[in-house]
Image (spheres, rainbow, N blue to C red):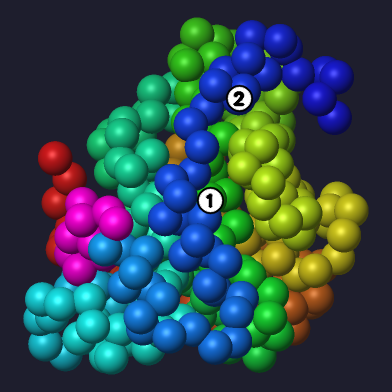
Amino acid sequence: MKDDIPDQILEKVSIFPNMPQAGVKLRALLVKEDVSTGEIEEILRRDPGLATNVLRLANSAYFGIPSKVSTLKHAVMLLGVQRFSKIAVSACASKAMDAAVEGYGLSPGELWLHSIAVSTTAEALTKNRKLPETSDFFTPALLHDIGKLVLGEFVKKELPKIEALVANGVPFEIAEKDVLGTDHAEIGALILSKWSFPSDLVNAVRWHHYPEAAEISTLQPEIVYIANLMCQSNVDSESAEGQQIMPYPSVLNQLNIKSEQYNAFAEKARSWMEKLSDTLTFD
Ligand SMILES: [Fe+2]
Ligand SMILES: [Fe+2]
């Protein structure tokens, strides 16, 4: 796939920063069965800034813990090890994703907010559909739009051409591909490969707009695709503001979701997003 991507863009991928070490270690805990509080604390203790962010996120109304927590131990106790680890991975991602993303019109914090909303929605969908807990649906949902961080400056340069296509009804990611020779999903997959992430996660990010094209059938691309659509609002430049886009019926069938269930879930996802944006402030 790399062959068609312009060299300048590939060069930016090659200098894209690595995932913070703490993030790599915490992510590995997500698919482990027995994780102790001590293991998590050990990782976070090495990065006090990260620990502060984790507590900030854990205390947000979004995660619904009943009382404010001030220690990692207390947060793990209330949230459970798995959920806490996910919050910690999200906090890691905030380092890269807090910034504004030019080209996509995302102001500071917006990409991160969208990413957290999609990952939490994906997690809720996974539970609702009783999908295997051994697969990681959370991480690809969290990182699905990471390619925008590289592609933003290129999109910005060609925005009039891209917007002209979008105005004619071409989906944004197809317009990106037509004009730039690649799209943010493909670039996101390259970043995850560079980070040596497992192929199922790379695949899920690669196909988050077109799950039917995925080479491996793991349901991860489908879940990320549906969760992303559910969380669309004006913070996601992939859709027109406030426009409700219905997913491909074949994907809904695959996950056994009826359209009424989809709508109810999407409404819930939007209210979670509101709660999250009310609680978190970005500076
Ligand atoms: Fe996307
Ligand atoms: Fe998205």
Q: Which residue is mark 2?
A: 13
Q: Is 220 in front, or is 278?
A: 220
- Relative to 160, residue 57 above or below: below
- Relative to 28, residue 35 above or below: below
Decide whether the magenta segment is chiefly helix, strand or loop: helix
**What is the span of residues highlighted in magenta in the rendered image?**
46-57
Q: Which residue is mark 1?
A: 143
- Relative to 150, residue 40 above or below: below
Task: Quadrant for the C terminus, please.
Answer: top left
Question: In this image, 79 relative to 278: left or right?
Answer: right
Q: Say what secondary structure mark 1 lies in.
A: helix
Name the image quarter holding residue 274: bottom left
Question: In this image, 249 relative to 143: left or right?
Answer: right
Q: Say what secondary structure mark 2 lies in.
A: helix
Q: Residue at x 34, y 48 (%)?
A: 94
Specify the amino acid type for callout 1: Leu
Residue 118 in picture, x, y percent from top left: 48, 61
Residue 121 in picture, x, y percent from top left: 48, 71
